[in-house]
Image (cartoon, helix red, strand yellow):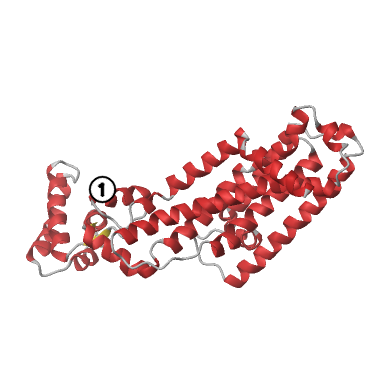
Amino acid sequence: MKSLRLLGFECKTQLRSVTFLIIIAVFTIFAVSQLTEVFHMPVKSEQDIQALDKSGERDYIFVKNTEDELRTQSVQFLKQRIEDGSIPQNRAAEFDNVFEMLESGTHNFDDVLLEMQSNETVSPWLLACKAQFGQRFGSVQEANQMILSDLGNVGYSPKLYEKYSTYIQIIASLIIFPIFLFLFTRDYRHGMYEIVYSQPMNSSKFLILRYLGAFIPLMLYLYGLGLILNLISAARFVAMGYAYEYTLFSPYFMTYIFPTVFFFSALLMVLMLLIKKATAVFPLYIIFVILNVTPNVFGSNGGWIKAISPIIRLDGAPNMMQDIMVNRIVCLALGAAFLALSCKIYKQMKTDMRKGITI
């Protein structure tokens, strides 16, 4: 009972902490800004299509132009470029054959592009035309047809969970530092570390409860935020009359977010207790996080970093589930080992009051 009261006290202290509230606000702003498509899919208007384009979710808003539209718009564009001087007059004659083939309708655009590929003047302009006029914004109906064709009855939930899990792993590993830093420095800042360290409670139990007092509210928030974003997305599908089958968030959360945050928070604990100086821990920790977030900077040598990284990104090549589970087990085991080591170090600190942690 005493342990539960202490855990409740630590959780309340964390929830009232300005640092914790600021970090929660950062999490919310970041998640909403990166996942704005949940507010616009399925689309209800042209404004939703424009919003999806700005958010980078362009898989469902473009449709292929017809061959006639591509040829007509390309001819108009190239003639305008000749008139305004973008294409020099001494090079304009090289486009006469292009205009003839496109306007006659006897050649499709790809045939013309293939025939002119050796022409260093014409070929880049034709490629630009294909990129610009090869597709157009779809109508609301066309966009929703593509959305339903690709997503089916599960809606946007699986893709939302994958994106959310990836983004939260990255941002959480970076900004949880202040939360677990102030677990110990608040004693020092308030001149309480001698009182705290001299309490009769088992030191390991005290440390674990203090850790859980920060970890549990953070996990509940991250889980709740993911659920809320999915409910917003699900509500749009249901409100527009589309069939929707709910996808559980807990498998994604427990596989990706929980082990990652547990590993990094436990690592922070042991680093803080070993080094006892936040300004010394911070650069070491940030370098380690960056190496795990961006393994591709090492080129072909980054493969082994991806394999052992506590951050599993779902925005690239798919990972084998067997490899993922091995990685997660290793992360959880290392996190538990870090906590055990933290308890041992913390117990030794109680015998020497001069070893308090400082900023």
Work out whether residue 141 or residue 90 is closer to the camera in this orientation and state it.
141
| Relative to 46, 104 lies left or right | left
| Relative to 214, 42 lies left or right | left
| Relative to 140, 291 lies left or right | right
| Residue 16: % across, % down | 62, 36
| Residue 10: % across, % down | 70, 42
Residue assigned mark 1: 47
Q: Residue furthest front?
A: 1
| Residue 101: % across, % down | 11, 64
Identity of the residue drawn at 50% across and 54% down = 226
Q: Residue furthest right?
A: 351
| Residue 68: % across, % down | 13, 64
Label 1 residue SS: helix
Work out whether residue 62 or residue 253 is closer to the camera in this orientation and state it.
253
Identity of the residue drawn at 17% across and 65% down = 66
Q: Say above or below: 347 vs 328.
A: above
